[in-house]
Amino acid sequence: MDLHGTTILAVRGADGVAMAGDGQVTMGQSVALKHKARKVRKIYKDRVMVGFAGATADAMTLFERFEAKLEEYGGNLVRASVEMAKEWRLDKYLRRLEAMLLVADDTSILLLSGTGDVIEPDDGAAAIGSGGSYALAAARALARNTSLDCEDIVRKSMAIAAELCVFTNDQLSLEILRNDEAKKETTT
């Protein structure tokens, strides 16, 4: 039986990019397996964030492959993502994997799927997983109608998704990549 059900959200703002994933792991309709799983991580010299949704073993396989692509292409997020998506779509084994990746650096957010998609959102927000639609709707509303920074938008949006989606909880793993201007402001 596959382990699945999650919500991953990434938001880009003037201060950088924040990405969070809930901590819940489910099996079928049971949500009591694990509550603090870490589904978002920084990789490649802490310059890239990756979040994964779907079957756990499948997601981990894709995570490892993506990390290798980043190494191969010197941290170039777009190039590594395109090459990963091509390999994922063409490889007989990888095509069967039931997972998605959300990847980001300090300038871009990309959604990767097994059908060869590499999608960059127009509005600087993207989400995957069972509660992704809820989190994305909340993030867009907050970004358009408040002056919150990317971290606060992600936290509040994930809280809303946790209220609405039974497969999403409020135990977040959160990563942030601050842009150079925001880094200067926090150090002065």
Image: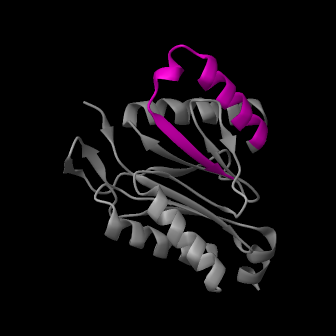
Colouring mode (rainbow / by chain / secondary structure / one colour): one colour
Position of 155 with respect to 30 (left or right) is right
In the rendered image, which quarter is residue 170 located in? bottom left
- Residue 142 appears in the rendering: yes
**Residue at point 69%, 63% (across, down):** 124
Q: Position of residue 121 (x, y in %)?
A: 69, 55
User: Is residue 164 rendered magenta in the image?
Assistant: no
Q: Is residue 23 above or below residue 139?
A: above
In the rendered image, which quarter is residue 64 located in? top right
User: Is residue 96 rendered magenta in the image?
Assistant: yes
Q: Is residue 19 above or below residue 182?
A: above
- Residue 151 appears in the rendering: no
Image quarter hosting the N terminus: top left
Q: Toward the viewer: 60 or 143?
A: 143
Q: Toward the viewer: 86 or 76?
A: 86
**Residue at point 60%, 25% (across, down):** 88
Q: Position of residue 57 (x, y in %)?
A: 39, 31
Q: Position of residue 11 (x, y in %)?
A: 62, 65
Q: Is residue 136 above or below residue 3?
A: below
In the rendered image, which quarter is residue 76 located in? top right
**Residue at point 68%, 25% (across, down):** 86
Q: Is residue 89 above or below residue 22?
A: above
Give the number of marks: 0
Q: Position of residue 50 (x, y in %)?
A: 57, 48
**Residue at point 55%, 70% (across, down):** 139
Furthest-top residue in view?
A: 92
Position of 176 with respect to 122 (left or right) is left
Image quarter hosting the C terminus: bottom right
Magenta stretch: give its range: 78-104
